[in-house]
Image (tube, rainbow, N blue to C red):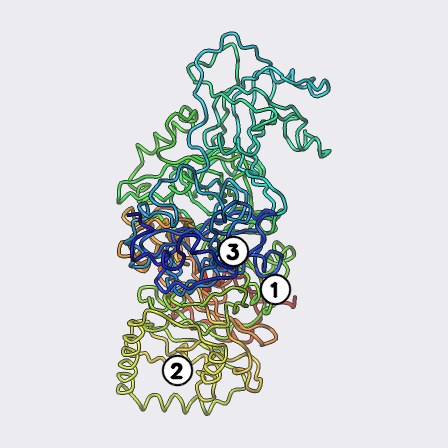
Amino acid sequence: MAASERPGCAFRAMFPDPPVGFGPVSSSLVCQEPVFVLSVERYPRDPESVGGLLEASSGSGGGGGRDLYDLGLSDGHCRLRATLHPSLNPLVRRNQLHCGCELREVRLGLEYDERRLSGGRRIFVLLEAQVVAKSNGAAPPAGGKLEVQKLQVFGQGEEPRQAPELPIKAKRRYYLPLWDSANYYGDAWQREPPGHPIQRLEGSRCINLKQLEDCIWQKKKDLPPVIVRILHKFRLYHFGRPDRYSECPFQAKFLVADKSWSVTVVLWNSLCMDWYRHLEPGMVIRLHNYIVKKSYATRMGQNPGVTKEPVLELNLNPRNPAAEITVINSRSVREEWQLPALQYCFITRKELSELRPGDVCDIIGLVTFVGRQERIRNKDRSDEFLVYRWMHLIDGTASEPFVLKLFSTSQPEIQAQISPCSIADNTVTLLVCTNVRVECKMMDPSGQTTFPYLLTTEYSQVYVNGYHQGKLYVKNPKVKEFIQWIQSAKDQERDRLSQTQIGGCYTYPPLPSSERDYRFEILGRCPLTTMSELKQLLNQLEYRERRQVTVQGRITSVKYQSLDRVDVESAEACHTGEPAIGGIAEFEELFDADQSFLGTRGNKSPVIPVMSNGAPRGKQAGLLLKRKRKGTTRRKKQASARMSKDTESSGEKRTTIHHPQTREKKVNHAGRPGQDLNFIKACQEFYTDSDDVEETPSAANPCSAHPVFPLANCSSQHEHLPHRGDISQMVARSFHFRDKAFLLQTFGLQPSRFSGIPADQTVDLEHCEPACCHGYYTVTILGLNEELSLDTIFLPIVPRLDHRAMYPAKHSNTLISILAHGGPASKQRCHVDMDSAESSPPSPGDILRSAAGLEEMLFIFVLDICNQGGTSVEVALNRAYVQHRAL
């Protein structure tokens, strides 16, 4: 019996086979059984994508956008493919609806393809559902038991599919990667090239590339073949548009050369899907049935000498004429062809400072840090994203590492395997990245402090363990020297590899430490953002989209939290909601729900609110005396009440989204008179090692902080945005091989397909050791107009061991100087001898005691914001500068 015919199949009960299942286009049924999302796949619209159930949002409205999404759904017995209604696309773009999640109350619409006889195929459209799984990618318990590979497609019986599944609502032969368009994705991309390498070339008449220059003017056709070597492989380019038909709108460029000249080879459309994965730099290929044109830059009137592009390009098409590509075996390459060798320009870290910005080079090193994957919008196409991550590599020639900003190189299989070294687990990651461009950042206007780093280009290639064999760079002298260094590495150098990190917040180059330098370098290019604009931007961010904004305002409270006792439930509270999603209905903004930051239980550090200068002192003194009289009995009662509350909250599996009115009531209640702490006295009562520190109601709620100026009932008038990000995802973790799969999944992007990993095999991120930062500060900032306040997270840079500490910072270690420098002062550089003595950094209590008079100062705040998925948005405080003059 076919899987789709089993008695328990919910889809079979909803939609029986034709002709019984025929019905109007508007018909829809609700599945009462749990439904699991097995895949979420993206593709662009085309002119036939409109009509039927998608007609309501075929235009620019409804949040549809230019993309459509096909879902793989399962009720546990069979698999059903459905198209997501375009009005629900924002849920995918924010990673609320993703593979591995569980859906309830699924409402499916049914329509038929009217372009086919006998009713054609049935098309299912997901109109409405309720997401009940966490947004951190963990599989639901029941979903982890699914044998995904054995599930049969609903309505297709047991016959195995012969070809890759194609988009449901468009004439496309491909799916796009879920989060960018620079990679290939799916089974339609051939793993092996068509045909076989040739061994004998006798009798074939060839032409050299220099002779092709005359063919442009003579417009000759049926030109002889050319034999060339691939020098550069460019990143894949997708040019599909929703208003045009094109089954495979891809372009792939290669720089090739022979003994006479160099040209650009351009593969179009389906040739990219057949050949792109196989053609690599260094290969020798024979090309026939090509079309010679001037290069694109030349046709656009640009000077080839400026663009550094060849004058000619050879265009290869799947038809008219059908291009012929043959890979020549290395044993069949003849010396008389005199093909140019593949040139490499490897540099060491010590030599990096000698290069100029814009120079292109190759690097090799051991990976010590791998950042999380983030996205930024493409400047040329604002609706597309570029995926990148930061990396550190060492080669033993300098104490500083290579800092590499690695974008997509159209090598998804290789980039998915990049992880840091782990000497403790006897694993070493050796990485080669070719054709990277040198960038340089000035730390101050005088140019005395610079931060060189590397940026991948459109023709960069990256290789890790398992991909080095057979590459021509293995014979490079610099590579051989690097291998010798690895084999003879000293214990001190191996210790550096035992402290490798992965993930967390990371920005580079570091910002200046003074307000004057920040104004001079950055502020002129990045205009200030208002608090209302910031709130709107937080609502609009898509999954892993990162922005850096600058606002000005005042600090109203500072609180320290140790990561050793982070409340796990505070992180889960941001993810376990059950947002009801529906067809054309309007969606609530991200910050309309009441999900206050709750990570304060178990914290020995009180909130340090900045008090208004005009507040009465008598009430403060009375409050302190009253608190002392209550003594230990009250503290025990509070501890018991908190423990009871924690027990109740730990038993809850779901949280609901409250209405905005609930939040307003809580803010008003927390801001009532009589709960203010004196700023200086609160600092004096700070004890890091005492169990008798009491958290007052105002200390437990950051919303109770008061503005600097004495305004009537201001604490209940301004709106407060609590921090809604997961702190555990903001902190880098020490890398261990045992956690490799989990850490790569956590700090990578959400996959398109469900892997079937049971939920009990995943590891809680809280159990992974923080790499260097063992605590953080919650800094509440208030806008100049005192209409909106916002909680930000400040992760101080720890000297010596922190991968973010790239230069020596010497300052007074006050809170103001730490916010300006990014962390406490250090007497020596990072990445040096670990046995050298160094004074211990100041304690959080000492830092907070230095905040006297903070309420009178106006600051410039540099914020790094990133959507972690769903409604979880992190706001990291990068720098805070005291303003010495008005902006």
The disc labelled 1 sits on which kind of residue?
Answer: Thr
Give 425 or 59, whichever is nearer the viewer.
59
Q: Secondary structure at mark 2?
A: helix
Please tell me in which quadrant of the rendered image residue 823 appears: bottom left
**Going from the N terminus, do you reach mark 2 or mark 3 first?**
3
- Seen in the picture, residue 608 relative to 331 is either above or below; the reply is below
For marks 1 and 3, give the CA distance. 15 Å
Q: Which residue is mark 3?
A: 546
For marks 1 and 2, give the CA distance. 33 Å
The disc labelled 3 sits on which kind of residue?
Answer: Arg
Give 357 or 254, whichever is nearer the viewer.
254
> Which is more foreground, mark 2 or mark 3?
3
* Numbered label tally: 3
Residue 803 visible to an observer of this rendering: no
Q: Residues within 10 Å of mark 2 (few under 14, many from 20)?
A: some
* Spot occupied by residue 177 in the image (x, y as percentages of width and height): 48, 45
* Spot occupied by residue 429 in the image (x, y as percentages of width and height): 35, 39
For marks 2 and 3, give the CA distance. 34 Å
* Spot occupied by residue 348 in the image (x, y as percentages of width and height): 45, 34
Q: Which mark is residue 396?
A: none
Residue found at x 48% / y 77%: 659
**Going from the N terminus, do you reach mark 1 or mark 2 first?**
1
Q: Which residue is mark 1?
A: 529
Does the residue at mark 1 contact the one at mark 2 (Cβ under 8 Å)? no
Q: Is residue 525 left or right of residue 740?
A: right
Residue 247 visible to an observer of this rendering: yes
Does the residue at mark 2 contact the one at mark 3 (Cβ under 8 Å)? no
Q: Which residue is mark 2?
A: 697
Please tell me in which quadrant of the rendered image residue 257 appears: top right
Q: Residues within 10 Å of mark 1 (few under 14, many from 20)?
A: few
